[in-house]
Image (cartoon, helix red, strand yellow):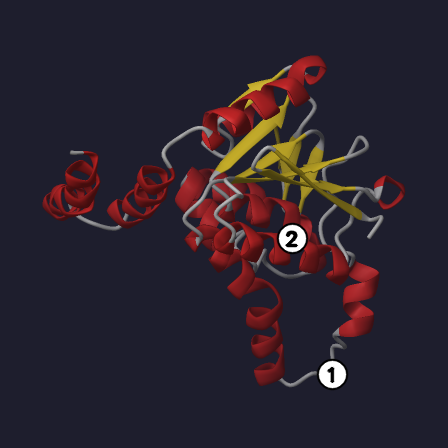
């Protein structure tokens, strides 16, 4: 589809949000392309990295609110609301976290709402100096409920999560770097080249070790120190013995 472009570049599956006239607001169809790409990344051994980027000055304004309100009317029951929430967004972002390959977001400009929430589910968030981040849901009388609360507080801590999700303030790229929301910031003029170089380095890593590293790091986050050391020994045993 024209609103999101898909290509494969030497093992790197590249998705490009391509709806600049609507600030790359994500439709249901665009989200489905992203979710299908995650499934392809998981199942195809030839695919090593998923890169999500955007055309135009915006990364994304978030969810396409007009379409969302038409598709999911406010008259739904509370049970239907929770069911649709999980089925249409939560389980897909959970799969982003679980797939044993790296997912990268290259954030070239303002990234709002659902874009920030998706960023919380990927492994690497790379920002242009033109990037900024915000969760405007609070201004609409709700919270960021697709990971913008649960994931951002884990990435950035309580203070920055309240800055974004409670105060509705924004972060520029350097503030996002300091807060732990992104891992690198590069000047806009060299951003695309730096992103692709990083993705190529990722694609060259040993796949098994990279997948185990992702699982182990995510597990260690919730373990005490002794449990973390035990997990390291268990995870490393097959990798080291395989290497011998």
User: Compared with residue 2, is residue 200 higher up or lower down, i.e. above or below?
Assistant: above
**Residue 128 placement, left or right of 225:** right
The residue under the point 48% across, 59% down is: 94
User: Compared with residue 17, is residue 174 higher up or lower down, i.e. above or below?
Assistant: above
**Residue 219 placement, left or right of 174:** left
Residue 89 visible: yes
Badge 2 crowding class, 10 Å Cα cut-off, few under 14, some 14 to 19, many 20 or more, is: many
- Distance from disc 1 to disc 2, alpha carbons, whole Å, reads 28 Å
The residue under the point 65% across, 51% down is: 114
Is disc 2 placed on a helix, strand or loop? helix
Q: Position of residue 81 (x, y in %)?
A: 62, 77
Q: Which residue is mark 1?
A: 75
Q: Position of residue 135 (x, y in %)?
A: 63, 46
Mark whose residue sits in front, 1 or 2: 2
Quadrant location, the C terminus:
top left
Decide: marks 1, 2 in contact (CB < 8 A)?
no
Q: Which residue is mark 2?
A: 34
User: Compared with residue 175, is residue 41 higher up or lower down, i.e. above or below?
Assistant: below
């Amino acid at each position: 589809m024209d609103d999101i472009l898909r290509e494969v570049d030497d093992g790197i599956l590249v998705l490009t949000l391509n709806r600049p006239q609507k600030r790359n607001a994500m439709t249901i169809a665009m989200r489905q392309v992203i979710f299908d790409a995650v499934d392809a990344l998981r199942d195809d051994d030839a695919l090593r990295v998923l890169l999500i980027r955007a055309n135009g000055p915006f990364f994304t304004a978030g969810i396409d609110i007009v379409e969302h309100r038409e598709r999911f009317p406010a008259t739904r029951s509370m049970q239907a609301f929770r069911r649709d929430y999980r089925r249409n967004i939560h389980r897909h972002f959970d799969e982003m976290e679980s797939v044993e390959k790296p997912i990268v977001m290259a954030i070239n400009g303002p990234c709002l709402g659902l874009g920030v929430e998706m960023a919380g589910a990927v492994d690497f968030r790379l920002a242009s100096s033109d990037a900024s981040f915000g969760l405007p849901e609070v201004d609409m009388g709700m919270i960021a409920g697709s990971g913008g609360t649960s994931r951002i507080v884990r990435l950035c801590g309580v203070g920055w999560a309240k800055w974004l999700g409670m105060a509705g303030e924004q972060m520029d790229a350097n503030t996002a770097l300091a807060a732990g929301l992104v891992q690198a910031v590069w000047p806009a003029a060299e951003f695309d080249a730096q992103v692709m170089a990083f993705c190529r380095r990722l694609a060259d890593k040993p796949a098994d070790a990279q997948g185990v590293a992702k699982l182990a790091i995510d597990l260690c986050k919730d373990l005490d120190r002794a449990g973390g050391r035990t997990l390291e020994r268990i995870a490393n045993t097959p990798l080291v013995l395989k290497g011998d």
